[in-house]
Amino acid sequence: MPTDIKISNHAINSASLRIIEKWHEDRKQNEGLYSWLVRICEEALTDQSDCKRDRIVHKGCVLIFAYGNEYPTLKTVKPNRHVYQTRTR
C-alpha cells in the first residue's frame, strides 16, 4: 500500500455514493474501492507537472486534495458534472 497519498474516510464514503459506477468501469481485477482511489490519485498527481492543484479532474471525477508537509490527502471526490452534461447532449 502506498504511503505517499492519504485517502480520507470522507473521500471513501463519497466515492461509494457518488462515483461507484466509475469504479466498476475502471477497476482492475480484485481491486477494491480504496485501492482504486489510491491508483487514480497517483495517476492524477503524476500528470500534474505544474504547481500543486487542489482540484484535479481525472477519469471523469473531480479529486479534491489538501497538501501537507509530507504527502497529499484526498479529501473528497465527486463526479465531473461537465462530463455528464456533455454525454447527454
Image (cartoon, helix red, strand yellow):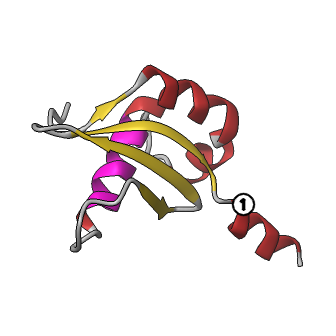
Q: Is 76 left or right of 14, judged from the image as shown?
A: left
Q: Residue at x 33, y 47 (%)?
A: 39
Seen from the viewer's position, the closer of residues 72 and 42 is 72
Mark 1 is on which residue type?
Arg
* Magenta span of residues: 35-45
Number of on-image labels: 1
The residue identified by callout 1 is 81
Which quarter of the rendered picture does the N terminus lie within?
top left
Q: Residue 75 in magenta?
A: no
Which quarter of the rendered picture does the C terminus lie within?
bottom right
Whether 6 is drawn above or below 26: the answer is above
Picture coordinates of residue 27 (x, y %)? 49, 46
Picture coordinates of residue 25 (x, y %)? 60, 52
Picture coordinates of residue 31 (x, y %)? 42, 36
Q: Is 37 left or right of 5, judged from the image as shown?
A: right
Q: Residue at x 57, y 35 (%)?
A: 15
Q: Residue at x 17, y 39 (%)?
A: 71
Mark 1 lies on a secondary structure that is: helix
Picture coordinates of residue 8 (x, y %)? 39, 26
Quarter location, residue 55? bottom left
- Residue farthest to the right, as pictured: 89
